[in-house]
Amino acid sequence: MPSYLFVLIPTYFDGKATTEIIFEIIDLEKINEKRYNLQFFVIDDSGGMDHDLLSLNKIKNTKIIKTSVSKGNQNAIIYGLSEILKTKKKNAAVVVMDGDGEDNPADVFKLLSEIESDANLELIHAVRGKRNIGIQFRILITIFRVIFRILTGRDWRTGNFCAIQVLWIEKNYNEIVSLNNFAGSILALPAKRKFIKLNRPIRRYEISKTSNEGKILYALNSLMPWVDKILIRSLIFFGFSILNLITSISISAYIKFVMDSATPNWFTILFVSAIALCVMSLSIFLTAYLLKSLSYISVTITGKFR
């Protein structure tokens, strides 16, 4: 059982909900008679503009970290992990949860109970069960999951909500930074993990202040940890596309010159489709390779200036 429990909450103008969540976790720990050294790390991504967080200054063992500029949800979490690692606590677990109320405070201890029951587990993911979302967002997230499945061969079933052993974070922190996406990197990196299904409540107050552009960038950024896998899958797909194109040309030539027959219209469509598949698979491969190269350059430059 971990001696220390760090609860990491990134928040962007969700101070009212975040404050309620922290008080509820404190009350639940008393009810459950846990013996954790409980500490909260709140990453205020509004740069101190969210005045609803001011009341948290009175809560013991609560650290509010204000970002100088908005880092976005994923980078705010990564920044918070670096602050937790500075505490040098080894026998500890970190629970990462959103501050808008869509992660249930009671579920924090469900995640922790899994780590307590098996000391070998390093990472417990919350798999989304029932959730109350609008039809537009449901359609968009379904499209994203289909694209993610095609590109990576994996299902996107989780978000930020998870419990992690600090030792695992310490071992993999540089990889998480280089991949630049928390939710994607913890799913992509090797770990002794377990998934548990948890229902997701609705936001407690107002709508998300994250722009649509920000949400799209988050979805695209979540693919970064899977660039290597996308490269391999797109290259294989390109190979099959080339094979399909060669086969189409061969059949077309056989029908026209050997059988002395006109090529049917359906075959023209098939031929054009084969070329389109080749172009699409090659485009995916080149895009993934470019992203991989840019990521490597970024990490190299960052390392030189540290």
Image: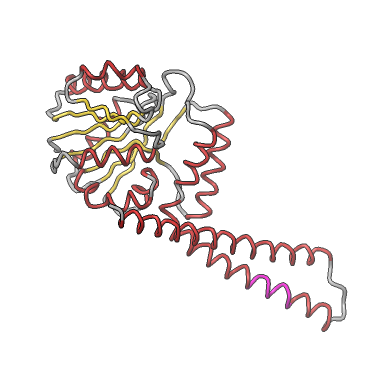
Residue 102's x, y, as percent?
40, 27
Magenta portion: prevailing SS class = helix
Seen at 57% across and 70% down, the residue is 239
Image side of residue 4 versus residue 8, left or right? left
Say whether residue 59 is left or right of residue 130.
left
Question: Which quadrant holds the N terminus?
Answer: top left
**Residue 184: % across, % down:** 40, 47
Percent position of residue 103, x then y: 36, 28
Q: Is residue 250 shown above or below 277?
A: below
Residue 23 as seen in the image, left or right of residue 265? left
Residue 246 magenta-highlighted: yes
Residue 134 to residue 275: above or below: above
Asked if the stretch drawn in magenta spans residue 157, the answer is no
Q: Nearer the viewer, residue 68 or 263?
A: 68
Identify the image quadrant of residue 274.
bottom right
> Residue drawn 58% across and 36% down?
139
Q: Is residue 225 above or below residue 100?
A: below
Give the residue at the far bottom of this rendering. 258
Q: Which residues are magenta?
A: 243-250
> Residue 205 lies in what quarter of the image?
top left
Q: Position of residue 177 (x, y in %)?
A: 33, 49
